[in-house]
Image: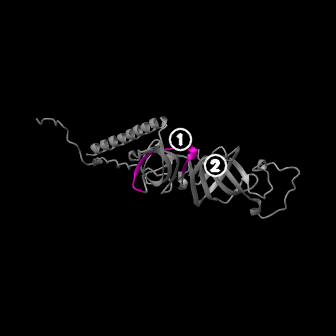
Amino acid sequence: MKSTSISKTFVSAILSVCLIALSSESILAQANKQVPKETLRSTGTILRIAPGFLQVKTKDGGQWIIKVPDKQENISVIGSAESNWLQRGMYVRFTGLFDKRGKPAGSINQLQVFSPDKNTKIGVFPDSGLGLETKALFSSDEPEDTPKPAKQPDRSQYSPYLVAGRLTAAKGGKLSVLAGRTLVQAQLAENVKISVTVSNAGLARIGDTVELEAWYPANQKAAGKAIATRLKVTATKPYSMTKRERPGRKPATKKPEAKPEKADEKKEPENPPEKK
């Protein structure tokens, strides 16, 4: 029964993907003919997901097969995440207290995962009013003409900096971030709040809510197929890395131990000599 159920599910999934692919080709073919278009603006919930496509149930109860926008700048995925979800290669942004050599003070309470674009500034930047140049940050060299400050409490030696860069390591709450040419080390607080604002439609999940603007060929609303020009996905649950449970091994069956022979017990020969 299990194999039959699995095969039916697999066939259903394949048919769904094929249906979506054929639908998209039909829409694109009509788009090339410059047919009149109608606009779809709505909110809804994701029912199914295939590469490059979403099946959405809109607030009016309609169901649409939506082609995801080709340009990433027209895609927005927002939500929250747990710290175990952070992975190497993600771009993150946070503010923390650091001294001029890059030594952190305390832990990071808030962090944002984001998608960089052509206007994104990557690096380490001081807060306004610090009177420090960015090129002098996290450097062991003191300018010759800068007077040494008087001795102050340790806390005063740290200042807030904005760090934006790519994660090179994330383990146990300890982060290594390559911010431009500077490698920054930071420790996440136990109750850190992580927000997600990215342009990766691959993070969309079944049950997430969507806001969309799309178009479809005029007089073909009943077909329920449209191409999105803008898509916003809001995650209904935090992103997290689920732990895979390894199946427990069965304990090895112990062989019964052979009873040791007693010294006073003598074995009788298998073929005793005949008595004369």
Read off the residue under disc 1.
Answer: 70
Residue at 77% across / 59% down in the picture?
A: 157
Residue 55: x percent and y percent? 42, 48
Q: Residues within 10 Å of mark 2 (few under 14, many from 20)?
A: some
Given the image, on which type of amino acid does mark 1 rest? Answer: Asp
Comes first in the chain, label 2 or label 1: 1
Colouring: one colour
* Residue 64: x %, y % from top left: 42, 48
Q: Residues within 10 Å of mark 1 (few under 14, many from 20)?
A: few
Image x and y of residue 166, in percent: 63, 46
The residue tagged 2 is 176
Quarter holding the N terminus is top left
Relative to 14, 146 lies left or right: right
Magenta residues, as a range?
60-76
Which of the 4 quarters of the picture holds residue 187?
A: bottom right
Q: Name the spot of residue 86 as percent of width and height, x first.
A: 56, 50
Up-down: is 187 above or below 21? Answer: below
* Residue at horizontal 60 percent and vertical 54 percent from the top: 112
Can residue 206 be seen here? The reply is yes
Q: Nearer the viewer, residue 234 or 65?
A: 65
Residue drawn 61% across the image and 58% down it: 110
